[in-house]
Image (tube, rainbow, N blue to C red):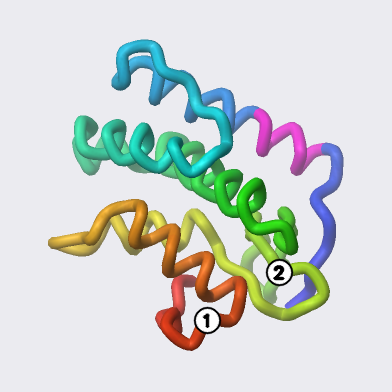
């Protein structure tokens, strides 16, 4: 597994996904826009609750997951965007700088969608933050 900083194309893709997430939230949350803060969790949750699972596939789920990742990056001082390259896949992740701890916001959000009863994005954020910060309380793994 190899970690690298996002390149220019990666940063453009992140920006494109954040713009799409803003469009989705604005359309479903009375014109509200994402700020990158923890208050975005409520807006993202409302957007998810309104949309059908099929409507959350593909670009929409990728965009919402990047918005979730931005909340982690903005609120955890020691975390930043990273590109994780494995043998078969290359993905955007949030990584605890200087460590091997990382999470895939997209993988976590897809797992969240697939659970019959999910605790909500605040709990998912807490789990991901715990994994990044090394919390013993957050031992679940999200691919």
For label 2, count other residues whose C-alpha is less than 10 Å away and answer few (under 14), some (14-19) or many (20+). Answer: many
Q: Residue at x 69, y 65 (%)?
A: 95
- Rendered image quadrant of residue 120: bottom left
Indicate which disc, 2 or 1, sits on the residue closer to the N terminus. Answer: 2
| Residue 38 placement (x, y as % from top left) | 48, 43
Q: Secondary structure at mark 2?
A: strand
* Left or right, residue 111 beside residue 117: right
Q: CA distance from mark 2 to mark 1?
A: 12 Å
Give the answer, above or below, for where 22 lies relative to 83.
above
Q: Residue at x 80, y 38 (%)?
A: 9
- Can you name the residue that lies furthest to the left here? 116
Q: Residue at x 60, y 44 (%)?
A: 70
| Residue 98 placement (x, y as % from top left) | 82, 75
Give the answer, above or below, for where 109 lies relative to 38.
below
- Rendered image quadrant of residue 81: bottom right
- Can you name the residue that lies furthest to the top here? 31
Tell me if residue 12 is in the magenta stretch: yes
| Residue 128 placement (x, y as % from top left) | 49, 66
User: For mark 1, what is the residue?
Assistant: 135
* Left or right, residue 81 beside residue 17: right
Q: Are marks 2 and 1 in contact (CB under 8 Å)?
A: no
Q: Secondary structure at mark 1?
A: loop
Q: Residue at x 72, y 80 (%)?
A: 100
Write down the region rendered in magenta: 9-15
Can residue 84 be seen from the camera position used here? yes
User: For mark 2, what is the residue?
Assistant: 96
What mark, if any, has residue 11 been given in the picture?
none
Give the answer, above or below, for where 22 lies relative to 44.
above
């Amino acid at each position: 597994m190899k970690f690298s900083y996002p390149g220019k194309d990666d940063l453009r893709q992140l920006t494109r996904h954040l713009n799409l997430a803003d469009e989705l939230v604005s359309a479903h949350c009375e014109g509200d826009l994402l700020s990158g803060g923890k208050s975005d969790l409520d807006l993202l949750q409302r957007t998810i609750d309104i949309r059908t699972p099929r409507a959350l596939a593909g670009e929409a789920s990728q965009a919402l997951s990047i918005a979730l990742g931005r909340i982690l990056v903005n609120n955890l001082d020691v975390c930043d965007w990273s590109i994780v390259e494995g043998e078969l896949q290359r993905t955007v992740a949030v990584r605890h700088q200087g460590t091997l701890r990382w999470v895939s916001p997209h993988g976590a959000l897809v797992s969240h969608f697939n659970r019959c009863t999910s605790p909500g994005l605040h709990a998912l954020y807490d789990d991901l933050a715990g994994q990044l910060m090394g919390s013993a309380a957050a031992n679940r793994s999200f691919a």
